[in-house]
Image: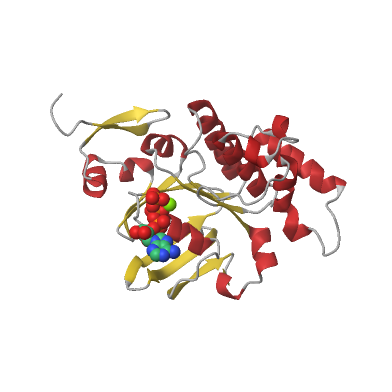
Amino acid sequence: MRQVKEYSIEVRNIEVSFGDFNVLKGVSLEIEKGQFYGILGPNGSGKTTLLKSMAKALRPQSGAIFVDGEDIGRMRAREFSKKVACLYQSTAITYDYPVMDVVLMGRYPYIKRFQTESVKDREIAKKAMIASNVWHLKDRRINEISGGERQRVFIARALVQETDIVLLDEPISHLDIQHQIEILELAGKMAKEGKSIVAVLHDLNFASMYCDHLIMLKDGAIVAQGEPQKVLTEEIVKKVYGVKPFIIDGMNGNRPYVLPLKKQGA
Ligand SMILES: Nc1ncnc2c1ncn2[C@@H]1O[C@H](COP(=O)(O)OP(=O)(O)OP(=O)(O)O)[C@@H](O)[C@H]1O
Ligand SMILES: [Mg+2]
């Protein structure tokens, strides 16, 4: 019997333009429940634009996006934020609140007007902060902690939204390798617990190690998608990045390892 897959997000042929500049040129994809997806591609290839479209922060000029079968263009903001949380790429900070308050902002879809957060909200925040390893920073001010620490605070803020879908734009870009691994392991664990995780990543090897599926973008279109072995081939990496790699098979749980080679002989 054919197994019916459960999709949490379906992107159908979306196009996004800024003025005359066509950034996404008809992108379609399906995100399965309980899976960890990595979106890869060079700078400017449209990764953030795609993620923002899925987060309802950008409205495509054509095509549609469905979350649990519902067109997101028709969903109310509050309902949508109970289903999808998004960590944006290097968020600008214009406020100077304590870390705990910043994390609690993620609870806003659940807090009624004129109410403040409850003991339960604080417990959820504590759990998320322990998971992203920032509990010890709870009383510090957001502008007084390091860039990597702040990144982990924003991850905690996305977690407290308690959504089934979590979108992460470069969640590990400012982190040291220990924290990179911690965040990716956390993302993998959340996927195993049934969430759909979609992360934009630049590190091909971490993407290979942790993601179940990879989606490779180039110039606003998907050039390859599937399991890491299928996407991280010498041919595709060379075509997309213009860099000739050496691929070592069977690393870190039988995943391909991409070793970039110098352009000129050493
Ligand atoms: N608001 C905007 N107005 C005009 N052009 C934009 C806007 N946002 C993005 N672009 C352009 O769209 C293209 C894709 O941008 P996007 O941010 O999606 O790339 P990206 O793949 O996330 O790149 P990076 O790896 O550098 O984060 C870029 O050429 C960018 O300059
Ligand atoms: Mg980006």
What is the total number of numbered labels drawn onto the structure image? 0
Res 116 visible: yes
The C terminus, quarter of image: top left
**Rendered view: 219 above or below 41:** below
Q: Which residue is painted at 13% across and 27% down in the image?
A: 265
> Which residue is nearer to you in this view: 255 or 134?
134
Q: Residue furthest left?
A: 265
Q: Which residue is painted at 66% across and 35% down in the image?
A: 131
**Rendered view: 126 above or below 250:** below
Percent across and percent down for residue 207 are 42, 39
Percent across and percent down for residue 238 are 22, 44
Q: Quadrant of residue 66?
A: bottom right
Q: Which residue is painted at 37% across and 38% down in the image?
A: 204
> Which residue is nearer to you in this view: 192 or 265?
265
> Which residue is nearer to you in this view: 189 or 50?
50
Q: Quadrant of residue 146?
A: top right
Q: Quadrant of residue 156?
A: top right
Percent across and percent down for residue 255 are 37, 33
Ligand 1, seen in the image, is in the quarter at bottom left
